[in-house]
Image: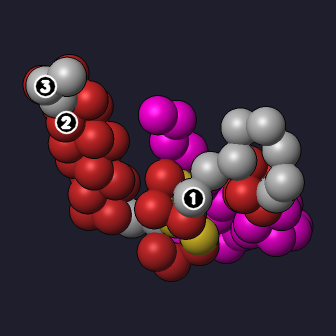
Amino acid sequence: NTFTVGIGIFDYQDSANPDLKFVDRETEAFAQFPRSETESKLDADQLKLLLNSNATLDQLGKVLDWLLENEADKMFKKN
């Protein structure tokens, strides 16, 4: 299985990092491609988006746990 994580932060808290206009929208558009009618179509449960204020270190940790759990399920799945 293939899994996708998209992270798009428009408004950075640290003023040393310039804001990136439309990056959240671009990330959402990027996420639509694997769900489109392509040969490698992804289901919604194979995709996680972290946008703007939801793109926290805590949420990133949860997404990494989600990826590891899915990889472990694949590794230990009995045929």
Mark 3 in CB contact with mark 1 (< 8 angstroms): no
Q: Is residue 72 above or below residue 69?
A: above
Percent of width and height locating residue 65: 22, 47
Amino acid type for the residue under numbered disc 1 = Asp
Give the residue drawn at x 34%, y 53%: 63
Q: Earlier in the sequence, mark 3 or mark 2?
A: 2
Quarter of the figure with residue 4: top right
Assess disc 1: are there few (<14), some (14-19) or many (≥20) residues with their C-alpha within 10 Å of its C-alpha: few
Q: Is residue 71 magenta?
A: no
Mark 1, residue position: 43
Foreground pick, 2 / 14 = 2
Mark 3, residue position: 78
Percent of width and height locating residue 21: 87, 67
Secondary structure state at the residue bearing disc 1: loop
Give the residue drawn at x 71%, y 37%: 40
Q: Gap between marks 1 and 2, in whole Å?
A: 17 Å
Q: Is residue 69 above or below residue 54?
A: above
Q: Is residue 15 magenta?
A: yes
Assess disc 2: are there few (<14), some (14-19) or many (≥20) residues with their C-alpha within 10 Å of its C-alpha: few
Q: Earlier in the sequence, mark 1 or mark 2?
A: 1
Secondary structure state at the residue bearing disc 3: loop
Which range of residues does the magenta coloring cover? Answer: 1-29
Judged left or right of residue 29, residue 49 is: left
Mark 2, residue position: 73
Can you tell which of label 3 and label 1 is closer to the viewer? 3
Q: Earlier in the sequence, mark 3 or mark 1?
A: 1
Judged left or right of residue 13, residue 63 is: left
